[in-house]
Structures are given as structure tokens and as C-alpha cells.
């Protein structure tokens, strides 16, 4: 009798898991449970082209609706998985239904970290299509915008709003922008980028209240729209209630299995040991991670037992800048610059004991692709080669 797979979560990871199973010739039943009423869609454009009106909702879908029917994927929309009964291998749905599984994939993602201060109910967030739609509608009427949080989402929203001519202020509690993800070199670059575009940035600033604007150090910054992008919380409640191990996400092993051999976890909500972090456990929020983890699990379920070891990479678009990251730079002891920061075309290479750990590239796509190839192959060029723009990194692999 063919096996059955149930996937909880209709984001990139969940959709890619279903698609990868069919690519790997899995012929059993696949059920994809989506809490949102929308079929799986792209999230990255929500804070970029969608906010700018360059991409419409009709073009956001990861697959046409016909794909699910043609590939025999049972798509359950607008329903929340309420409980996992591991003994009977059953997922109970809040509306009263239940689905049996032989293998279960948790692609449950993460949720916005909420503000907790007076007036916080007036703040908008951006993670889902419905939230993006509400923000786009409000931006159309707004003259001034305050963005709370100077991370990737906050700065993308700030760039989109400023491009539309809004008066934009970014308020960041840390002493530099994107401090948890990038080095001071890149923080300074993006601070200058937003400043030259007319965005006001306040660093080391804490908001005490929302009152027709944001109150900082006793002064009110007026705003027609206030958006918070202060990080996310992994959705671990369902897994924890089922007795699965959780930490900063759902805990999985090298093959992305949870503490139950029949259950896997992937995507933004999974905490995995990562070879590019020296084996440390990490939780990565990126399209690359979602796609590659989904493919890894599909191989294991179809009998190919794969260990997850893909190179992490990520990108963001802000104004006319495309910033791309490859690898994980934590713990580096040396930085090598290639290119010219003033020209907005440069890369920063991060090494530890002479080993290449990661590369950050601004408007240098060739460097980014070369970096991914070098990291995948475990090749570490010399500092002189990395700094020399005439050296083709891809040819060093």
C-alpha cells in the first residue's frame, strides 16, 4: 500500500516539499494543510515589488492551481492543524477533520514578534499576503511612515515607502542596522544608502508608546503609518504539544528528522545542525533554506537518506542595490574587500584561520555565484586572490 505524507504549512517550504516528493517519484498521497486561505505564494516580493505596485497578487503564486490537481496534491486551505496524535499518526484539524500520515513534515514557519507597548494595536506588520495588502492600501494614502526595526524587512519597507515619495523614519534599538546579520561594514553602507535617499534613521533609539506617531525619548514622531519589523518567533507550539523537542525552533538532526523518526521539520521554524556554522544549531529564514531542506526531506522519504549541507544564501533589494549573502560569517577573524564601496559595487569576504566562511556582495552577482561555488567545494582562495578583481572566483573551484 502506498505511503502517505502530510505537510503542515503552506509557505515556500511546504510547497517545495510536496513538489520535491513528486519529482522524486513518490506515488503516495500528499496532503498540504495551509492555515491561510491562499494557495502557497511568494513572500519575498511582499516587501519589495508588491508594495511598489510592480507585482500583483495574481503573479505571486508559487504554482498555478492546476498544478496541485495535476500532481495529485490535496490542498487544504484556510484550515489550522490543531493537534498531532503521534500514536495513531493522525493530524487533527481545527475545523473537525483529521488526516492520517505515514510521514509528517512540519513546515510551520514563524510569526511576527509583536510590539508590547501602549498603542501597539495601531501598528502594522508584514509577513503574510493579507498583511502586505493592508500595508499597501495604507501606504497609498500616507504621507509619513515610521518603521520600527532596522533589519531586512524594516529596511525593505522603508525603501519601498521612500521610493513612493513618503517621509520615512526608521527607528532601530541597536547601535547599527541589521546588526544580527551583517558586519559593521555593511551596516554603515546601508545607513549611508538610506540616508542619501532621504530616509531618517535613528539608532540606539527605543519607542515608549504609539500616539498618532512613535514616542521616542519623550518626543513624538508623527506618522500616518507605523510598521514594525522586529523579528519573528518560530512556530513551535504544535510540535511541543506533541512532545517533540524544541529550542529556537523545532529541533531536527542532520537529516531534518525531529525526535520522532516519522516527523520532519523544515524551513523558518526548524533548528538544524549546520556545517557552515561549524556544526552549531541554527534556524535560517530564507527561500534557499526552505527549498533545499524540502528537497533533502523528499530524498529521505523516498529512500535516499540525505544529510542537509547546502550553502546558505540570501538576498535583499533596497532602492537600486541588490545585496547577496553566501555562507555564515560568525566567528570570522579576517575581512577582505573587493571592489569599491563608494561605487556601490563591492564584496566583503570573511575568513577564519585562512578558511573562507562567507561572502557579502553588493551589486556584484558574479562574486556571489563564485562565492557559492567556492563554499560548496570547500575552496579557500588566498586573500590576494580575493582582493584582485581580475581573478575569476568561479575558475578557482
Image (tube, rainbow, N blue to C red):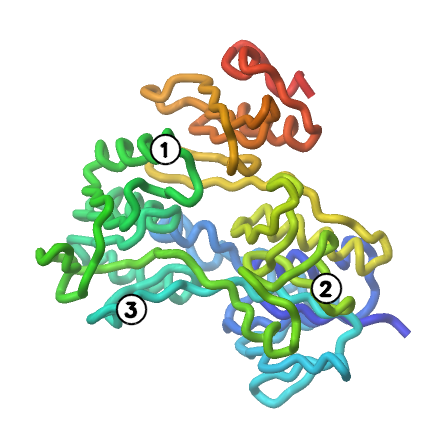
Q: Which label number is shown at residue 184?
A: 1
Q: Nearer the viewer, residue 5 or 83?
A: 83
Residue drawn at point x = 54 percent, y = 58 percent: 61
| SS for callout 1 | helix
Q: Indicate the quadrant containing the C terminus: top left, top right, bottom left or bottom right.
A: top right
Tell me where residue 192 sits by quadrant.
Answer: top left
Image coordinates of residue 97 in percent, x first then y, are 64, 87
- Which image quarter: residue 218? bottom left
Q: Nearer the viewer, residue 54 or 275?
A: 275
The image shows residue 152, relative to residue 7, as above or below, that is above
- Counting every numbered tag in the picture gives 3
Left or right, residue 106 beside residue 321:
right
Which residue is under mark 3? 116
Q: Residue furthest left?
A: 219
CA–CA distance between discs 2 and 3?
46 Å
**Residue annotated with mark 2:** 70
**Mark 1, residues whose alpha carbon is within 10 Å: few (<14), some, or many (≥20)?**
few
Amino acid at each position: 500500500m502506498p505511503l502517505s505524507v502530510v505537510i503542515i504549512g503552506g509557505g515556500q517550504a511546504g510547497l517545495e516539499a510536496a513538489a520535491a516528493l513528486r519529482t522524486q517519484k513518490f506515488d503516495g498521497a500528499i496532503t498540504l494543510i495551509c492555515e491561510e486561505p491562499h494557495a502557497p505564494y511568494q513572500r519575498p516580493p511582499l516587501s519589495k515589488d508588491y508594495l511598489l505596485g510592480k507585482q500583483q497578487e495574481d503573479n505571486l503564486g508559487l504554482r498555478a492551481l492546476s498544478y496541485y490537481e495535476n500532481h495529485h496534491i490535496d490542498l487544504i486551505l484556510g484550515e489550522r492543524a490543531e493537534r498531532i496524535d503521534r500514536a495513531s499518526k493522525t493530524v487533527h484539524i481545527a475545523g473537525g477533520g483529521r488526516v492520517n500520515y505515514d510521514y509528517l513534515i512540519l513546515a510551520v514557519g514563524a510569526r511576527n514578534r509583536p510590539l508590547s507597548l501602549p498603542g501597539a494595536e495601531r501598528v502594522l506588520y508584514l509577513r503574510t499576503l493579507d498583511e502586505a495588502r493592508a500595508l499597501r492600501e495604507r501606504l497609498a494614502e500616507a504621507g509619513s511612515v515610521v518603521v520600527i526595526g532596522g533589519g531586512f524587512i524594516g529596511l525593505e519597507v522603508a525603501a519601498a515607502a521612500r521610493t513612493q515619495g513618503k517621509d520615512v523614519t526608521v527607528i532601530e534599538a541597536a547601535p547599527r542596522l541589521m546588526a544580527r546579520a551583517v558586519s559593521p561594514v555593511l551596516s554603515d553602507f546601508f545607513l549611508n544608502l538610506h540616508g542619501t535617499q532621504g530616509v531618517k534613521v535613528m539608532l540606539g533609539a527605543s519607542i515608549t508608546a504609539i500616539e498618532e506617531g512613535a514616542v521616542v525619548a519623550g518626543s513624538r514622531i508623527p506618522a500616518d503609518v507605523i510598521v514594525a519589523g522586529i523579528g519573528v518567533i518560530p512556530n513551535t507550539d504544535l510540535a511541543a504539544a506533541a512532545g517533540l523537542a524544541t529550542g529556537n525552533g523545532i529541533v531536527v538532526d542532520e537529516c531534518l528528522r525531529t525526535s520522532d523518526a516519522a516527523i520532519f521539520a523544515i524551513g523558518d521554524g526548524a533548528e538544524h545542525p549546520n556545517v557552515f556554522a561549524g556544526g552549531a544549531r541554527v534556524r535560517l529564514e530564507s527561500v534557499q533554506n526552505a527549498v533545499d531542506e524540502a528537497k533533502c526531506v523528499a530524498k529521505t522519504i523516498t529512500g535516499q537518506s540525505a544529510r542537509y549541507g547546502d550553502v546558505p544564501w540570501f538576498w535583499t533589494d533596497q532602492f537600486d542595490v541588490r545585496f547577496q549573502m553566501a555562507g555564515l560569517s560568525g566567528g570570522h577573524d579576517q575581512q577582505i574587500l573587493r571592489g569599491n564601496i563608494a561605487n556601490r559595487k563591492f564584496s566583503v569576504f570573511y575568513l577564519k584561520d585562512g578558511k573562507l566562511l562567507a561572502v557579502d556582495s553588493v551589486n556584484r552577482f558574479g562574486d556571489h555565484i563564485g562565492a557559492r561555488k567556492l563554499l560548496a567545494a570547500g575552496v579557500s582562495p588566498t586573500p590576494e586572490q580575493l582582493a584582485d578583481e581580475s581573478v575569476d572566483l568561479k575558475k578557482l573551484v
